[in-house]
Image (spheres, rainbow, N blue to C red):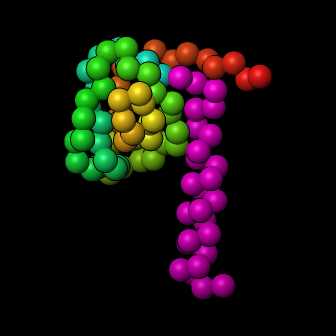
Amino acid sequence: MSIRKNSGVLFLLTSLVACSDHPNETWVAEVKTPVYDGVEGKLVFYLQPADRCEPGMDMAGKADMYTKVKCNSGDGWVMDGSFKKIARSTR
């Protein structure tokens, strides 16, 4: 297998494993938090205090760590923000 194919397979496996970085958590924004369209992407909106999000995978940018979030106000990527982390039941 070529290096290019190996890299693609490694990326897919890493992506699948990374999807469970925050299992069974709901995040609640505690402060106004910027949300970006991608890692090191453009600002698309702000989470307001009390907005609820389901965190997904983490990914490192050049200097910061980002987390993919699905929130009641939209989807995107956040850097280190101030979130209250609430455990979801695992029924």
Question: Which stretch is magenta?
Answer: 1-26
Q: In the picture, which quadrant includes the N terminus? A: bottom right
Q: Residue at x 58, y 32 (%)?
A: 22
Q: Residue 28 appears in which quarter of the rendering?
A: top left
Q: Residue at x 46, y 15 (%)?
A: 84
Q: Is residue 50 above or below residue 42?
A: above
Residue 76, given in percent of the width and then of the height, sits at 37, 41
Can residue 83 be seen at all in this image of the molecule?
A: no
Residue 34, given in percent of the width and then of the height, sits at 26, 32
The residue lying furthest to the bottom in this view is 2
Residue 81, given in percent of the width and then of the height, sits at 35, 25
Q: Is residue 46 left or right of residue 22?
A: left
Q: Is residue 91 left or right of residue 33?
A: right
Q: Is residue 83 left or right of residue 2?
A: left
The residue lying furthest to the right in this view is 91
Question: Front-most of 36 and 40?
Answer: 36
Q: Is residue 8 above or below residue 65?
A: below
Name the magenta segment's main secondary structure: helix
Q: Is residue 78 above or below residue 52?
A: below
Query: Residue 71: within the magenta?
Result: no
Q: In the picture, which quadrant includes the C terminus? A: top right
Q: How many marks?
A: 0
Question: Front-most of 74 and 40?
Answer: 74
Q: Residue 63 appears in which quarter of the rendering?
A: top left
Q: Residue at x 35, y 49 (%)?
A: 39
Question: Front-most of 91 and 55?
Answer: 91
